[in-house]
Image (spheres, rainbow, N blue to C red):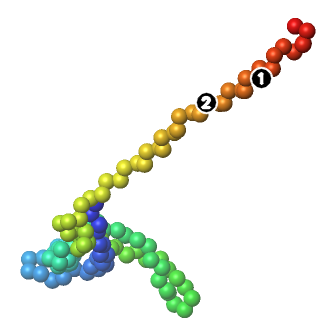
Amino acid sequence: MTIWDYRVTAAPKRGIKVKGAKTTEDRFAAALEEVMNQLGAEGWEYVRSDTLPVEERQGLTGRTTVYQTLLVFRRPRAEAAAPDATPRILRPVAAPIAAPPVAAPEPPAAPLLGPADPRD
């Protein structure tokens, strides 16, 4: 079983100027590409992007909700990637074997005293 380390970083808010990128979309894509290539060179694998609400202060006592876009990356944890790490397979525990039923003891036999009436 692979154990992952995760890294979450904010997505760029603005595009960057690069040769050949003239539209806002192209410049933003270039900024996103730069972030992803930089983290990819460090061994991080892109997983997904999430947009989550965040409360920010506005003025002295006010609060407002804004949305932040985050990029999620992962890579295998160093100690988990060691070649001697073998996956463990968990098996369900079997129910204990029940002991065979114990037979109830037989009632004692009537005592052999002889006839109940001595005249017999």
Residue underneath mark 2: 103
Rendering quarter of residue 33: bottom left
**Of residues 37 and 110, the one drawn nearer to the viewer in this rendering:** 110
The answer to whether residue 45 is seen in the rendering is no
Residue underneath mark 1: 111
Residue pictured at 18% horizontal, 82% vertical: 16
- Density class for disc 2 (Cα within 10 Å; few <14, some 14-19, many ≥20) is few
Look at label 1 and name its amino acid.
Answer: Pro
**Of residues 74 and 98, the one drawn nearer to the viewer in this rendering:** 98
Image spot of residue 21 (x, y percent): 12, 76
Look at label 2 and name its amino acid.
Answer: Ala
Q: Distance between the residues labelled 2 and 1?
A: 23 Å
The answer to whether residue 118 is seen in the rendering is yes
**Of residues 110 and 18, the one drawn nearer to the viewer in this rendering:** 110
Image spot of residue 61 (x, y percent): 57, 88
Secondary structure under the numbered disc 1 in the rendered image: loop
Total numbered labels placed on residues in the image = 2
**Of residues 4 and 72, the one drawn nearer to the viewer in this rendering:** 4
Quadrant in the picture for the N terminus = bottom left
Quadrant in the picture for the C terminus = top right
Secondary structure under the numbered disc 2 in the rendered image: loop
Rendering quarter of residue 52: bottom left
Q: Looking at the image, is 17 positioned above or below residue 113? A: below
Residue pictured at 40% horizontal, 48% vertical: 92
Classify residue 49 as left or right of residue 82.
Answer: right
Q: Looking at the image, is 56 positioned above or below residue 111? A: below
Q: Nearer the viewer, mark 2 or mark 1?
A: 1
